[in-house]
Image (cartoon, helix red, strand yellow):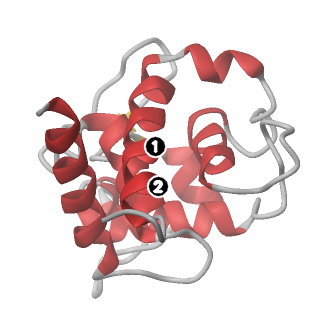
Amino acid sequence: MALVKQAMIAVTAAVIFALVYGEGVDPNCLGCLCEASTKCNASTACHTPYPGAYFCGPFLISWAYWADADKPIIEGDNAEQKGAFERCVQDLYCGAETVRRYMAKFLDIDCNLDGTVDCRDYAHIHMMGGYGCKDPSVSTTDFYKVFEKCWDVVSAASSPTAT
């Protein structure tokens, strides 16, 4: 039953992001990144888990990550206005757009050195950034363990042999 619950959570998250699907990152991948970050909790407040860190929203996005993604905004907002970062990344759609734009800058990096660039690499990038993603310690984090479970379930459910 736990596997079915995990599959439903992953599929629900993927459906949310399928609505805003864009180029580059598969909506199932976005769903698993969100699930691993906060269980895709849209009400996740901004917080400072350690000095110098500030993360917000269901994807736990930092200001630097948002800025590297060219500061996407909610329609009608102004990226230079105070609070634009928080308003965007606390919104599921704008947060997903931030992740897509960030990943677009690093689409060709094989972070886990397995010879394939896929969602597992995007999980490394989401956690460590595009320039630090080859750090093997990523795979030992709670984030990555949740991501891996989600991605395995989603991948199995979407394979041609799944019934």
Q: Quadrant of residue 107?
A: bottom right
**Of 82 and 4, the residue lying toward us:** 4
Q: Which mark is residue 138?
A: none
Which residue sits at x=29%, y=28%? 47
Q: Give yes or no for contact between labels 1 and 2 (Cβ–Cβ under 8 Å).
A: yes
Q: Quadrant of residue 90?
A: bottom left
Tag 1, which secondary structure?
helix
- The amino acid sitting under disc 2 is Ser
- Which residue is the site of mark 2? 155
Which residue sits at x=30%, y=77%? 74
In the rendered image, residue 105, in percent from the top left (x then y), is placed at: 74, 65
Residue at the extreme bottom: 76
Quarter of the image with the C terminus is: bottom left
- Which residue is the site of mark 1? 152
Could you tell me if residue 116 is visible in this image? yes
Tag 2, which secondary structure?
helix
In the rendered image, residue 95, in percent from the top left (x then y), is placed at: 36, 61
Location of residue 23 with respect to 147 vertically, above or below: below
Horizontally, residue 116 falls left or right of residue 70, namely: right
In the rendered image, residue 110, in percent from the top left (x then y), is placed at: 83, 48
Location of residue 61 with respect to 106 vertically, above or below: above
**Of 90 and 147, the residue lying toward us:** 147
Quarter of the image with the N terminus is: top left
Horizontally, residue 67 falls left or right of residue 117, namely: left
Could you tell me if residue 80 is visible in this image? no
In the rendered image, residue 78, in percent from the top left (x then y), is placed at: 38, 77
- The amino acid sitting under disc 1 is Asp
Which residue sits at x=44%, y=27%? 143
Total labels: the figure holds 2
